[in-house]
Image (spheres, rainbow, N blue to C red):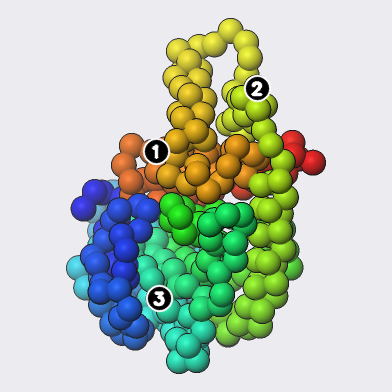
Amino acid sequence: MAHEVESMMYVGDTPWHGLGVAIPDGKKLSIEEAIVAAGLDWEVELRHIFTEDDEGSPHGILNHYVSCRKADNTVLGIVGKNYKPLQNRDAFRWFQPFLEGGEATIETAGSLKWGSRVWVLARIRRDPMIVGKEDIMRHYVLLSNSHDGSLAVRVGFTPIRVVCNNTLCFAHESKASRLLRVKHTSRVRENLEEIRETINLAQREFAETVDQYRRLASRQINSTDLVRYVRVVFGLKDRKRTPAQEKQEKIIPSVVRLFENGRGSRTAGTNYWGAYNAVNEYLNYFRGKTRDNTLNSLWFGQGAHLNKTALEVAMRLAA
């Protein structure tokens, strides 16, 4: 695999990022099966950092630790004294009640950046919602974690547009969203348990978000406003440009083509919903040199920020 994705698995159809080991459609994985299939059956430990004196002898212990994978001694990152690792198995176990109760099924999981970041994506088994025509939305829960101290443990909800299998974002800065962040402390497992109470709240917000998508679908957009929308989302200025800015300008015709002939253009329509989906499809499929770089950016980096901005701008311009 390419260098960003170390290992991963998926159930059923190939996901939008086109990566991973396939598991037969319809197979309901247990926690242990998912961990093994995703290549995440390893543990992390913290080791002291020593310095050397002028003669090369160990001297003193710094106030930081090395986070290492025990199986092969891979260094995952440098962390502070308050960092408490959340093992992959403990992260996966958060889903156990939902699997046992038939509320969710694990669909994809894996590790990025040589194991420093891991994730689990599960589909909530509720009826899908329709934005317009045949545009179907399903509800997922994403748990992500870092073993290098760069990210807190996060559990968040995301809709995925089935027609082109791209990840969208929630419209709300909600109470549920604020609760779904857990720091690496001694209470990390207990905090994850408390998050279960937000599932029903998130489902209600999912319905509210789909209503906002429907409002976007009800507002038509012309070619001039489409270009304006893309410029605002990507921060493109109408002025004398540097070579780097000229390169950025190529985003506009790329998004316009996706608006007219993209994977989901027929179901989205020539409206602000279609414009948002064109930008979203660009972020999901075309931004980034490799598909695994795109995945990392979409969930953890600038792609996630642009995805959120694209929705906010669409809502504002369509109002």
| Residue sitting at x 58%, y 85% | 193
Reading the image, the residue beneath label 1 is 286
Residue for point 58% across, 54% down: 133
Q: Secondary structure at mark 1?
A: helix
When asked about the image quadrant of residue 64, the answer is bottom left
Q: Compare residues 251 and 24 and report the one nearer the observer.
A: 24
Give the Cα distance between marks 1 and 2.
Answer: 23 Å
- Mark whose residue sits in front, 1 or 2: 2
Q: Is residue 177 positioned above or below 298 on the image?
A: below
Q: Residues within 10 Å of mark 1 (few under 14, many from 20)?
A: some
Give the CA distance from mark 3 to mark 1. Answer: 26 Å
Q: Residue tagged by mark 2?
A: 224
Question: At which x and y percent is residue 98?
Answer: 50, 85
| Disc 2 to disc 3, C-alpha distance | 42 Å
In the rendering, at what x and y percent does residue 90 appear?
42, 82
Residue linked to disc 3:
106
Q: Dot 3 surroundings within 10 Å: few (below 14), some, or many (20 or more)?
A: many
- The quarter of the image holding the C terminus is top right
